């Protein structure tokens, strides 16, 4: 009998039988290890949570009072027979890759990550492993980010020009991570900065963690014409058209997201400007992280799975798709938006780890989910 895989797909999520825990499960479980606080990874309803110490503040805002333990970066803990540690993923405050070691095998689950330096969270740390479970939100060659400072400078220029014309600048961005990165990066001397109420409690947690953010006003400050005509207003995309935002004078609007690399995505958003700023790795960043992991096998999930699996296969790597529910819904969904457009027409279907009949192919053989003969991910 070959050893069972260290992680297997269960209906609740990615399961480690040797340690009896799940990673970022999408259904309620007894013990959940959480990579980061975005809603597609950190869900309510689990009995016990384990996360990076750096993420406890943002998880508190998102999950409310739950039973949660925090681990310092790199601090090993043994669960069952599995040695578990959390390592920075560079995605948002507290975001972690989770390393699992058991009987000589090492897996790393990346969560969401980026390799570009970001002053609002601990930098991505390459972790060596045999099997690397990587996200692939922007796993296409078209996605190549400019350095953050250039994007921030472009936002500053847009905001300055609007303020000089007596117009507000409404910048739509995700509330957790993106908003704080923008606040930290823009030139706050240009004018007043206003944040939607969904962003304010997260700002406080970032500041408590030592991240430098400028003073901001609540959305009600838009009642003051001196503010309404010059402000930079940060708001989540879902708040577009809300009464609070309608106070602002003849606004120019924009959206900050990796998807803004695609012209069609900006058109659909119907905003004046798109700033290509993502908290996920771009195409070279994914390759860099995969290379640095030294992994013999790469499991791809969360985004442009098929193109990345195909590319890795062409490079002679053992790569396969892993069907999770990461990237679905929530504030980090950066997804949905552009998927149809971004996939090249000739992209082959990825080699699935779940078959058409709903069989889990990456399995520990439990729960009656026996793999068919010759299934990938087994043996
Ligand atoms: Zn995320
Ligand atoms: Zn995600």
Image (cartoon, rainbow, N blue to C red):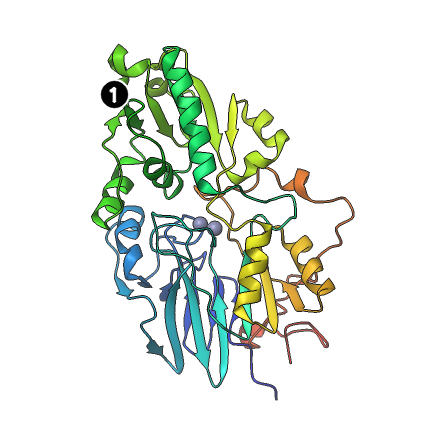
Q: Is residue 162 above or below residue 75?
A: above
Q: Residue sitting at 42 percent across and 66 percent down?
A: 98
Pick out the residue farthest to the left.
Answer: 208
Quarter of the image for the C terminus: give it: bottom right
Query: Residue 112's x, y, as percent?
Result: 47, 54
Depth check: 286 or 234 in front? 286
In the picture as drawn, the residue positioned furthest to the right comes out as 346
Residue at 29% from the left image edge and 26% from the top image edge:
193
User: Which residue was labeled with disc 1?
Assistant: 220
Circle 1: element type:
helix
In the rendered view of the protein, which quadrant contains the N terminus?
Answer: bottom right
Provide residue 40's location: percent of width, then percent of height.
Answer: 45, 50
Asked if residue 109 lies left or right of residue 245, the reply is right
Front residue of 128 and 5: 128
Say left or right for 306 vs 288: right
- Residue, far bottom: 1
Nearer-the-camera pick, 373 or 203? 203
Please provide percent x and percent y for residue 354. 64, 63
Residue 300 sits in quarter = bottom right
- Under 8 Å from ligand 1: the CB of mark 1? no
Res 149 → quadrant:
top left
Residue ID at (59%, 31%): 265
Q: Is residue 225 above or below residue 124?
A: above
Whether residue 133 appears in this view of the structure is yes
């Amino acid at each position: 009998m070959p050893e069972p895989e260290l992680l297997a797909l269960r209906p609740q999520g990615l399961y480690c039988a040797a340690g009896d825990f799940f990673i970022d499960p999408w259904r309620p479980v007894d013990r959940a290890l959480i990579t980061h606080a975005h809603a597609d990874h950190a869900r309510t309803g689990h009995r016990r949570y384990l996360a990076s110490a750096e993420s406890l503040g943002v998880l508190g805002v998102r999950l409310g009072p739950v039973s949660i333990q925090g681990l310092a970066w790199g601090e090993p803990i043994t669960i069952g027979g599995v040695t578990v540690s959390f390592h920075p993923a560079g995605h948002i405050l507290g975001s972690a890759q989770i390393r699992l070691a058991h009987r000589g095998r090492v897996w790393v689950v990346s969560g969401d990550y980026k390799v570009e330096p970001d002053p609002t969270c601990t930098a991505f740390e390459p972790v060596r492993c045999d099997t690397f479970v990587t996200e692939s939100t922007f796993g296409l060659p078209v996605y190549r980010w400019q350095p953050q400072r250039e994007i921030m400078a472009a936002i500053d220029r847009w905001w300055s020009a609007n303020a000089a014309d007596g117009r507000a600048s409404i910048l739509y961005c995700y509330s957790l991570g993106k908003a704080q990165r923008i606040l930290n990066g823009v030139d706050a001397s240009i004018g007043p900065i206003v944040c939607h109420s969904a962003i304010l409690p997260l700002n406080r947690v970032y500041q408590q963690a030592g991240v430098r953010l400028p003073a901001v006003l609540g959305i009600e400050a838009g009642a003051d014409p001196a503010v309404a005509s010059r402000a930079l207003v940060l708001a989540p995309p879902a708040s577009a058209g809300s009464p609070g935002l309608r106070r602002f004078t003849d606004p120019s609007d924009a959206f900050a997201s990796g998807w803004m690399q695609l012209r069609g995505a900006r058109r659909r958003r119907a905003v004046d400007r798109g700033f290509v700023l993502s908290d996920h790795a771009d195409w070279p960043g994914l390759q860099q992280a995969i290379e640095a992991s030294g992994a013999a096998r790469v499991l791809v999930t969360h985004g442009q799975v098929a193109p990345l699996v195909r590319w890795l296969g062409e490079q002679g790597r053992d790569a396969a798709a892993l069907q999770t529910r990461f990237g679905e819904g929530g504030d980090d969904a950066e997804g949905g938006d552009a998927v149809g457009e971004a996939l090249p027409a000739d992209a082959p279907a990825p080699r699935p780890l779940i078959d058409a009949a709903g069989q889990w192919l990456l399995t520990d053989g439990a729960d009656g989910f026996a793999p068919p003969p010759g299934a990938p991910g087994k043996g």
